[in-house]
Amino acid sequence: MDNTGQRDNQDASNRQYAWDLVRLLVAQGFTDWFYCPGSRDAPLGYALNQLAASRRLNLHVRIDERDAAFMALGSTRAGHPAVLVMTSGTAVGNALPAVMEAAHAGLPLLVLSADRPAALRGTGANQTTWQPGIFGNFVRFATDIQPGVTPAELQRAVSAAVASCRGVSPSPHPATNEKHFPIPGPVHINASFVEPLAPPETIEAFATRATRTASANASENPLDPHQAPRGTLLIAGDLSDATYTDLCEAVENAGIPVLAEPQTAWRCHPNAVRGYAKAAGTTLSEVAEHNLERVIVAGRPTLTRPITRLITRRDIPVETVGAPGTTVNLADNIARQWTDASTLACELAKAAKPSPPAAPRPPAETPESWLEMWRVAGEDAVAALTQDWGFHSAAQAIWDSTMTAPEPVDLYLGASLTIRVFDAVARILAPNRVFTNRGLAGIDGTIASAWGAALARRQPMRLVFGDVSFFHDLGALCHGRTEEVPNLQVIVINNGGGRIFGGLEHGAAPAETFTRMFLTAQVGDICGLARAADWQAERIDNQADLVSALAQPVRGLSLLEVVL
């Protein structure tokens, strides 16, 4: 079915909604804006960037929401009431200290958080939490605006928010949580946006670029769905449980490919597939569309779009295994919830019983097995990703070195692009402990999280993340003179900013827009900053030096800056 017209309407509606919201606040005198880049708040970012270019507002871009919140507070205290804008998830929580200060100081600070639609709350959707009411009694007024809001409703909500921010009694609005205070103070506007999150022209440019890339990388012998095998997939994400011995055995015997995120124990399953997301989105996209018979989901897989598409399908049975609350249900399409893994294992074992042999087919027409097809496609994808020096080849070296080290070394993976790169290349090796912050998938506090885990585990720990995440948690480099220091090695993949956005539609935005609003490369000497906090630091710019550095034992506090 052609849904081009519907998508165009969504593009226009989303864009207009963001523009109207920003313009209404600017018209009310809020001309100082502090913006923290993200995916869900991108519609607001595009509007702010264009209005800043025409000098209709003052725009400041910061990667750390806590810092941005206090900058907005300082602007407000200096007589220029400011708006703080951030994306969904933990980003919103970082504003609480500044909101508390504004509440007790009577400062008209306006917090504008982007969100996913209310229907996705409680479904396991990535970076989705309960943002309405997050600031409690510290805000004078809070409103939760959903997509599809009419211009009149938006006008009333903004007017009420601004009136409360300035200490004026707000006009009645049924969708708001009104709080009447006699003095100015902070307010919270939570605005939900649906995809697509980029302007139509950017999406079109991205689609054109993706088509060219796909054509250039097209296989000379594409798989024919009519000749390829059919089968089931087990997809495992955060909170998944691989302690079910009978289920693991049944999955292996049934030849079911396991598409598991690298922090899960399922990644060590004999049927685990590397490069599965890339294969599902390219080489096997048509085969997965036509030949997939069943999807079993364990935990909350949230890393990639191809996998999200598989677990939101309605034309095949999508089933979950695990306790309620640990599984994902993004599209309300779950055909069955297996709370007893043993029952599922028995069902898979029965289905895997051999059937009478079919008539022989010519060798040229005989397809490979469903599992082997996924393995081959995945390994081909990994080979293409790691053939040159870059993030994927560095990640593979780090993973291999860590998993084969003479002494046990834990691994902590940063959110954003890092976890996705490791998801592609991580081999099936010894089950060392792999940690990552996937509850809300925020980049904040990553160094501190790894530090705490290393203290608790009392064995060497490697943290791998990007340069933006490093700058976001600079304070965690410092420690008290009398405090215990773990054996922690921080590996910063310095690729010059938030490169994850380059793989999304925003990567096709005009260069100046992409650089300022999404890439956000930071000023600062990573090794110099680490040395100033008394860490050993080394800069690496090639594969051989990285392998050599990784061969050294992890002792004390050390940092490797891997420059790509």
Image (cartoon, rainbow, N blue to C red):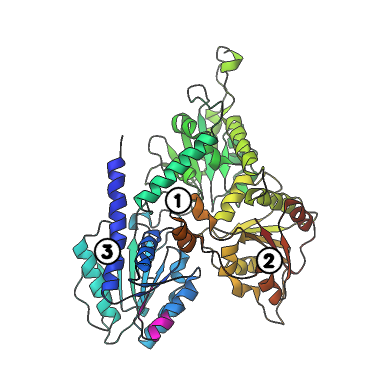
Q: Amino acid at mark 2?
A: Ala
Location of residue 522 with respect to 227 vertically, above or below: below
Q: Position of residue 495 (x, y in %)?
A: 60, 58
Q: Which residues are magenta?
A: 73-83
Q: Position of residue 318 (x, y in %)?
A: 43, 39
Q: Amino acid at mark 1?
A: Ala
Q: Which mark is residue 20?
A: 3
Q: Position of residue 99 (x, y in %)?
A: 41, 78
Q: Which mark is residue 508?
A: 1
> How far apart in space, not on screen, are marks 2 and 1 (Cα)?
40 Å
Residue 27, picture quadrant: bottom left
> How far apart in space, not on screen, are marks 3 and 1 (Cα)?
24 Å
Looking at the image, is mark 2 or mark 3 earlier in the sequence? 3
Comparing 543 with 534, the one in front is 543
Q: Position of residue 459 (x, y in %)?
A: 73, 63
Looking at the image, is mark 3 or mark 1 earlier in the sequence? 3
Crowd band around label 1 with a 10 angstrom C-alpha radius: few (<14), some (14–19), many (20+) = many
Q: In this rendering, does residue 178 appear at all?
A: no
> How far apart in space, not on screen, are marks 2 and 3 (Cα)?
48 Å
Residue extending farthest to the front is 54
- Which residue is denoted by mark 2 in the rendering? 454
Comparing 528 with 160, the one in front is 528
